[in-house]
């Protein structure tokens, strides 16, 4: 057996940063779910809001949920990673502060300046809208996203740098020394390090692509005579959007590795197959964003074939290694199911379950009749709502348990059951709407699509209720944790941090 | 057809997954040694991997035989009727709005402002074909109508607040006859 890694204690400042991330994520989650319900009831004809407001809400829901998942994922990744790699907690706080500023700017853009160009802000839409309604909305939004991106980029630089230092090169975080025979160890670095390395590589690339297209849009708004190629912009947009949204689960899955291994009291080690899987995940995640361009016939055919074939292949690491590993590690382990372990396990089901309709839709002939129908939000709501979001909630329970000795209540298990069943109802209603060709992103629906909207909206009300319960329980308990940080302390801390940096 | 297939496959596979996860979740109570579980698990995994890859290879093989990608010069060879489609915020402009059953049509799709999506729907509001309408590019959809009736073009790429009003009706008639196909 390889000797166990040295581990570092988790500092108070780190815990503050982690709780701060979770608190913002949970608050945003609840607000965005409420927005989701408003959208569905409007589409279902139960209420009527103006299309302008609908699309502003849609924009905020999209970016808000992706941001929420990123913040929650970052909290999980950081909390576990800093046991193996000493990380500077100020960087975590900086990310939180920049993200909160970014979120505020995005809300101002959408609700004060009526920005509604969707979270994917496909060029040249923001500049065309800016010409029609003034540039303030687009400027607030694009710069807000940039703030969030910069916060994360700084975080990834810190993580990447420290992993490289500890393991003698960033790629050794993915076990290259072991895979390519320069090390005689049987196992690579801890799973948390492997996953974090993958995320650093993929998401830094994503953020750079996103920053490029945001700056292109801003230039075009400020000086409309400078124009860019719409297809190039779309490539950059989806290189950003696809990878950034995907990276949320690769950050959060660190919690699955750590928590299930601990509960099952079995090691979840990075053996050769594990490392190979994560190396391929890294590569595929960078390549397969072209599945968003399958209906752009101007894209070279080979790129579109990559989009299909490697989207299939990208299912393999999770289905054969990560989810399979989760099944193996709990099997006859004697582990106790509670909120933390149970939800982490459920989240693996959500991940694979979401991959099924995603892979089907990445088939070009299927995409031809399902792209940009409700099928698309159908599949990513499974993987985000029953995957990433569940991992974040599981971690909230784990955190209070480990740091604050809190126990689950039977009420928690009821909430979890409601969340699961009704989230399946919500996503089922989306997929069904996709099957009957209802387009996505339509403020107003035809009568034949409305039943699915109403079913989805009602299901979502139960999901929201369960989420509020999870969140209240988290906030009520987190006060008693050893971090004992009140909101005042946090506000104080973040403002002093801002003062220092200005 | 593909929609139906996608739906059934998804429902069946997700259900099967749920069964697997639930089964394993219920088999955690008694603790046994991990070593033999790992050995057996890795052996099963090999077959699981091979079967997944085989399914993917077969699906790839069959699904790549009928790609919707056609190039703009094909019309000359096939004698298809060429229709120019332009997307604007928030309407469609077509060089022709009446078509005949059995006649191959080539839609040359582009946009004059932001990105739009050209989605061709039949009378039952089922999506038959689509492509993106992107400024500066022309994407080609080849289509031969097999039934007369009223068809609609819906916008399938978000293009700002009037996205959902971008609907255009086109008519397909029986070849040679004056009938509108309704009776
Ligand atoms: C109560 C739960 C939720 C409800 C009711 C809900 C509802 C909706 C609705 C109605 C849409 C627009 C669908 C359309 O295109 O017509 C949407 C889009 C979206 N949702 Fe959710 N959602 C929920 C949870 C989530 C979660 C948990 C996430 C991610 C963590 C998420 C991420 C997104 C994203 C990224 C979009 C795309 C926005 C766009 O098309 O621009 N949603 N959601
Ligand atoms: Cu994608
Ligand atoms: Cu549109």
Image (cartoon, rainbow, N blue to C red):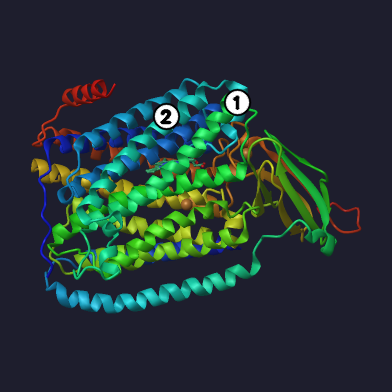
Task: Kindly identify which numbered label has been placed on residue A223.
Answer: 1
Q: Tell me the quarter of the picture where residue B33 sits.
A: bottom left
Between residues A56 and A133, which one lies in front from this camera angle? A133
Q: Quadrant of the C terminus of chain A?
A: top left
In this rendering, would A236 be left or right of A17? right
Q: Is residue A501 visible?
A: yes
A133 to B112, vertically: above or below:
above
Look at the numbered disc 1 and give the secondary structure of its residue.
loop
Q: Is residue A414 visible?
A: no
Chain letter for the residue marked with disc 2 in the picture: A
Q: How many marks?
A: 2
Asked if the residue at tag 2 contacts the one at tag 1, i.e. Cβ–Cβ closer than 8 Å, the answer is no
Residue receiving disc 2 = A144
In this rendering, would A45 be left or right of A324? right
Instruction: Give the mark toward the camera: 1 or 2.
Output: 1
Q: Residue at x 82, y 64 (%)?
A: B78
- Residue count near mark 2 (Cα–Cα under 10 Å), binned few <14, some 14–19, many ≥20: many
Q: Residue at x 27, y 59 (%)?
A: A172
Q: Position of residue A290 (x, y in %)?
A: 53, 54
Between residues B110 and A280, which one lies in front from this camera angle? A280
Q: Position of residue B62 (x, y in %)?
A: 58, 72
A64 to A53, vertically: above or below:
below
Look at the numbered disc 2 and give the secondary structure of its residue.
helix
A484 to B101, vertically: above or below:
above
Q: Position of residue A347 (x, y in %)?
A: 30, 54
């Amino acid at each position: 057996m390889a000797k166990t890694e040295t581990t570092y204690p988790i500092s108070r400042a780190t815990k503050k940063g982690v709780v701060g991330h979770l608190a913002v994520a949970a608050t945003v989650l609840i607000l965005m779910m409420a927005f989701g319900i408003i959208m569905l009831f409007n589409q279902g004809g139960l209420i009527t809001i103006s299309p302008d407001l609908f699309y502003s809400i849609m924009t905020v829901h999209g970016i808000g949920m992706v941001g929420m998942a990123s913040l929650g994922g970052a909290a999980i990744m950081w909390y576990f990673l800093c046991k193996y790699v000493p990380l500077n907690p100020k960087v975590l706080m900086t990310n939180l502060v920049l993200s909160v500023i970014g979120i505020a700017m995005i809300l101002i853009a959408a609700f004060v300046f009526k920005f509604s160009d969707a979270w994917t802000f496909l060029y040249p839409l923001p500049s065309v809208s800016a010409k029609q309604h003034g540039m303030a909305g687009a400027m607030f939004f694009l710069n807000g996203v940039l703030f969030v991106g910069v916060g994360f980029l700084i975080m990834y630089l810190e993580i990447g740098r420290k992993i490289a230092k500890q393991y003698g090169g960033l790629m050794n975080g993915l076990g290259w020394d072991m895979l390519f025979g320069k090390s005689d160890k049987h196992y690579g670095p801890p799973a948390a390090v492997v996953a974090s390395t993958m995320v650093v590589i993929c998401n830094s690339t994503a953020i750079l692509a996103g920053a490029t297209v945001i700056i292109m849009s801003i230039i075009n708004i400020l000086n409309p005579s400078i124009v860019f190629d719409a297809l190039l912009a779309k490539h950059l947009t989806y290189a950003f959007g696809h990878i950034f949204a995907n990276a949320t689960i690769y950050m959060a899955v660190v919690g699955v590795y750590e928590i299930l291994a601990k509960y099952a009291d079995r090691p979840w080690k990075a053996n050769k197959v594990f490392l190979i899987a994560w190396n391929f995940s890294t590569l595929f995640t960078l390549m397969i964003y072209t599945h968003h361009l399958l209906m752009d016939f101007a894209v070279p055919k080979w790129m579109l074939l990559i989009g299909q074939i490697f989207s299939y292949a990208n299912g393999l690491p999770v289905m054969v290694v990560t989810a399979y590993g989760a099944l193996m590690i709990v099997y006859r382990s004697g582990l106790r199911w509670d909120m933390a372990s149970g939800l982490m396990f459920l989240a693996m089901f959500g991940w694979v379950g979401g991959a099924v309709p995603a892979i089907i839709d990445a088939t070009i002939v299927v995409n031809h009749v399902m792209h940009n129908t409700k099928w698309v939000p159908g599949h990513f709501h499974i993987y985000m709502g029953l995957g990433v979001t569940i991992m974040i909630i599981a971690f909230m329970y784990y955190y209070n348990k480990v740091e604050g000795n809190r126990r689950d209540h039977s009420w928690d298990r009821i909430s979890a059951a409601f969340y699961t069943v009704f989230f399946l109802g919500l996503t089922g209603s989306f997929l069904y709407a996709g099957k009957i060709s209802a387009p996505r992103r339509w403020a107003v629906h035809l009568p034949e699509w409305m039943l699915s909207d109403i079913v989805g909206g009602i299901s979502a009300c139960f999901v929201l209720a369960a989420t509020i319960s999870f969140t209240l329980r988290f906030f009520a308990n987190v006060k008693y944790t050893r971090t004992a940080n009140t909101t005042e302390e946090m506000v104080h801390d973040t403002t002093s941090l801002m003062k220092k940096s200005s | 057809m593909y929609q139906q297939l996608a739906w059934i496959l998804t429902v069946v596979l997700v259900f099967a997954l749920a069964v697997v996860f639930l089964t394993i979740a219920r088999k955690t109570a008694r603790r046994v040694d991990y070593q033999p579980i790992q050995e057996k698990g890795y052996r099963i995994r090999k077959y699981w991997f091979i079967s997944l890859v085989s399914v993917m290879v077969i699906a790839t093989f069959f699904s790549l035989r009928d790609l919707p990608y056609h190039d703009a010069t094909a019309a000359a060879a096939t004698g298809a009727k060429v229709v120019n489609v332009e997307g604007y915020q928030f309407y469609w402009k077509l060089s022709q709005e009446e078509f005949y059953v059995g006649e191959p049509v080539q839609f040359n799709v582009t946009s004059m402002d932001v990105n739009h999506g050209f989605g061709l729907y039949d009378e039952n509001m089922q999506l038959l074909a689509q492509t993106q309408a992107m400024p500066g590019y022309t994407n080609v959809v080849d289509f031969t109508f097999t039934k007369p009736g009223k068809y609609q073009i819906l916008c399938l790429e978000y293009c700002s607040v009037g996205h959902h009003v971008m609907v255009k009706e086109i008519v397909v008639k029986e070849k040679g006859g004056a009938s509108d196909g309704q009776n």
